[in-house]
Amino acid sequence: MATAAIHTAHAAHGAHAGVASIETGAKTKPIHYTSRKDSAGEGLTNSTPQKVISSSETGLLTNAPSLEIHDFDMLIIGAGISGINMAYRYQESFPERRYIVLEQRENIGGTWDLMRYPGIRSDSDLHTFGFAWRPWPEKIPIAEGGAILEYMKESAAQYGIDKNILFQHKVKESNWSSREQAWIVQADAIDEQSGKTIVKHFRGKFVVLGTGYYNYDKPLEANISGIGNFKGRVVHPQFWPKDLDYANKKVAIIGSGATTITLLPALAKTAKKVTMVQRSPSYIVSMANRTTPRWWEMFVPRYIQQRLTRIMYLFIGIWLRRMMKNPKKMREWMTKDTKKLLPASIPFDPHFNPKYDPWTQRVCLCPDGDFFEALQEGKAGVATGVIRTVTDTSIVLESGETIEADIIITATGLHLQYGGNSAFKIDSEPLDWHTKFLWRGSMIQDVPNLMLVQGYTTASWTLGADATAHMTCRMLKYFQRNKYSSATPRVTRSGVVEQNWEKGLMGLTSTYIRMAKGRLPKNGVEDPWRARKDYLWDLWFAKFGDLRKGLSFVECVGE
């Protein structure tokens, strides 16, 4: 990698960047791979020689006299839906450049490979949650986790993305070198021959975090009084035991979010009784889990049908978000729908009457009303109130109500964090996430060439991830045209007005989100530091907006 003289170029904020279509510059010889399958899943071996550099050359890595560094133009961390989508957009925009995806698990899928609890499914429609470049092929909009995982694997294989994934590579540390204008990434990898853990180093000009927003290794620890007294099994959905037998058992699920709304009807099929134990209620909306056939479909090719269906669901989402501006109307509609679906034995208030407006916390979907159906059949129930204590066989609320249980499931939220539980440093100085602002919901203040992929909380995650991918590729083309080596979000001397945390992260106020305040970066109230919320606007900006506001660029001279 050439090391050239550099100088900082602060871009003017006037005209648009105008980099929607530019010529690709110097070509890089594509990397060649051989792939093979083994017990660890789809493996990948780089058959091109690697450059060995000394620790003094990097100025960063001082643990060994020499290190083998694997060089790439782009490093993508995480092979979930965000990482796969970013890989597609990158290879589409830069077919001659080299990239690699580092994945700590043995398989593609991220969340959909990790979460294995009964009934796991999407909480938004797959027509918009699926990839824009390979539309969801099924008629049902809400799909189970296994079908989503298979769809992701097929998509990655169809476009050769799976050949660029290194599995069982857990990133431990990423260090930006201002002198090299590159990231040095250290990963613990499982050696295919010995099965032992070895340390590998990768270098890339740009890093994308497709690592999601929660800790894969550590669940959120809920403070439940007396939980240690319980003689039965206590289970967190994030680490569902394969041997858990809940047939003919009394199951209590603590929580009222999307996981609970998914688990309850699935467990009720064989459990003796399933009770949702909630401190406060959530909004639950029944959605018909089928795409109604249209008369014109017989005249239209299947791939066009899929794209038209995606557009239809996009506009349904836009309509719902417009309705959010009138929370009173939304509440009235949801209340009417819920009352209609509840059995006479379960009152609407207090069990289904939230004290907050719709979408200040996530609205839960239940396909074909399966949650309410379980209540109607008498296989499930609801208890609302603060937990006083847990005994050896039950949960006792402050009201005195007692819920008998053989199994307790703590569906109380996720341990939120960014970065995939690894360390990040800028010239060896640790990154303190919670002191930084987010630039356009994607880059971290004072951190060069690092893109954080986030989705939406009021729409499908992948829509936001795709807008970020488009913006990333366009920014890299802007680098190419102007001979820039890096871009860093900088706060001006006037500073940024921080968003009040009473409004929550990304507009949500759920308890598990509030608990993460000391771990997550901040949003401002003004552009370019405010949170993203509107897909159409974000996509337009990603393709045509002025990328320069709030960024400081470094120009590589003589490279």
Image: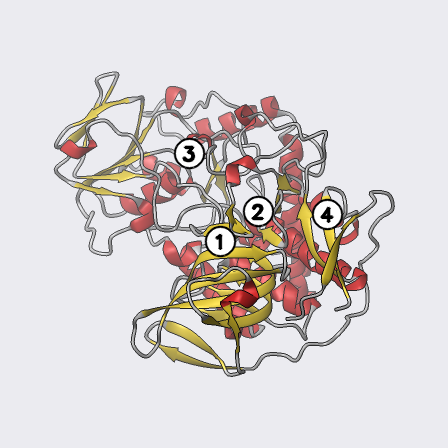
User: To which residue does mark 2 refer?
Assistant: 455
Residue 494 location, quadrant: top right
Secondary structure type for disc 2: loop
Mark 3 vs mark 4: in front: 4
User: Mark 3 belongs to which amino acid?
Assistant: Tyr
User: Mark 2 belongs to which amino acid?
Assistant: Gly
Q: Is residue 216 left or right of residue 174?
A: left
**Mark 4–mark 2 CB contact (< 8 Å):** no
Residue 274 location, quadrant: top left
Identify the residue at horizontal 80%, vertical 63% (top origin): 481
Mark 4 vs mark 2: in front: 4
Marks 3 and 2, Cα distance to the nearest angstrom?
18 Å
User: To which residue does mark 3 refer?
Assistant: 512
Q: Nearer the viewer, residue 89 or 365?
A: 89
Identify the residue at horizontal 39%, vertical 79% (top origin): 37
Mark 2 neighbour density, 10 Å: few (under 14) some (14–19) many (20 or more): many
Marks 2 and 1, Cα distance to the nearest angstrom?
12 Å
User: Mark 4 belongs to which amino acid?
Assistant: Ser
Earlier sequence position, callout 3 versus callout 2: 2
